[in-house]
Image (tube, helix red, strand yellow):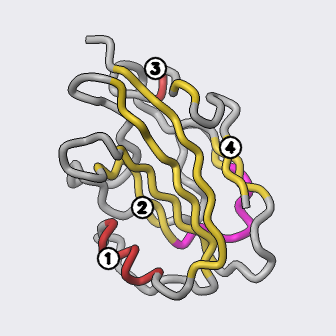
Amino acid sequence: MIITSNAFSDSGVIPEKYTCEGTNISPPLEFNDLPAESKSLVLIVEDWDAAAKPWVHWLVFNIPPTTNSVTEGQKPQGGVEGLANGGTFGYEGPCPPQGNHHYQFKLYALDVVLKLPKEVDRRQILSAMQGKILAEAILSGFYHKKT
């Protein structure tokens, strides 16, 4: 399974457009080589350099396994947005207080559709996913806030 973006390469710099210093919209994403037996996908975007490790910038679950791309500025079609660390639903772009921060766009293929309310957080999603993960993929990027 592979997750990519045509906006930045793996381990590359995330363009300002997708951060708090730009228009703060989600980057375009592509999902490839999903397991045939997938019933749903989960996307979690995390900052592992934040003081609260990890800081969740986006949490989307129950994405249909037929999804192979996500349009810039849109949530994955059919997916449910859970709570990000800012207490919000939806994408929160990179916005490190200082220094270069490392972000991971993690994609999970599950053998079930999760029966959870949309008000779930990372901890609850990870708990519900235990024993149900068929495959996972990571797209990494970096961002250094200019101001």
Q: Position of residue 41 (x, y in %)?
A: 60, 69
How far apart are the alpha carbons under marks 2 and 3? 23 Å
- Dot 1: element: helix
Q: Is residue 41 left or right of residue 44?
A: right
Q: Is residue 130 above or below residue 59?
A: below
Which amino acid is tagged 2? Glu
Who's the residue at 34% across and 46% down the image? 48
Q: Which mark is residue 108?
A: none
Q: Residues within 10 Å of mark 3 (few under 14, many from 20)?
A: some
Q: Is residue 1 left or right of residue 81?
A: right
How far apart are the alpha carbons under marks 4 and 3? 18 Å
Residue indicated by mark 4: 4
Question: Would residue 64 be counted in the magenta stretch?
Answer: yes
Residue 34 sits in which quadrant?
bottom right
Q: Which mark is residue 81?
A: 2
Quarter of the picture holding the N terminus:
bottom right
Residue indicated by mark 1: 124
- Dot 2: element: strand
Residue indicated by mark 3: 16
Which amino acid is tagged 4? Thr
Question: Would residue 94 be counted in the magenta stretch?
Answer: no
Mark found first going from the N terminus, 4 or 3: 4
- Dot 4: element: strand
Which residues are drawn in magenta? 62-69
Which amino acid is tagged 1? Gln
Q: Is residue 83 above or below residue 112?
A: above
Who's the residue at 52% across and 88% down the image? 131
Q: Position of residue 43 (x, y in %)?
A: 52, 59
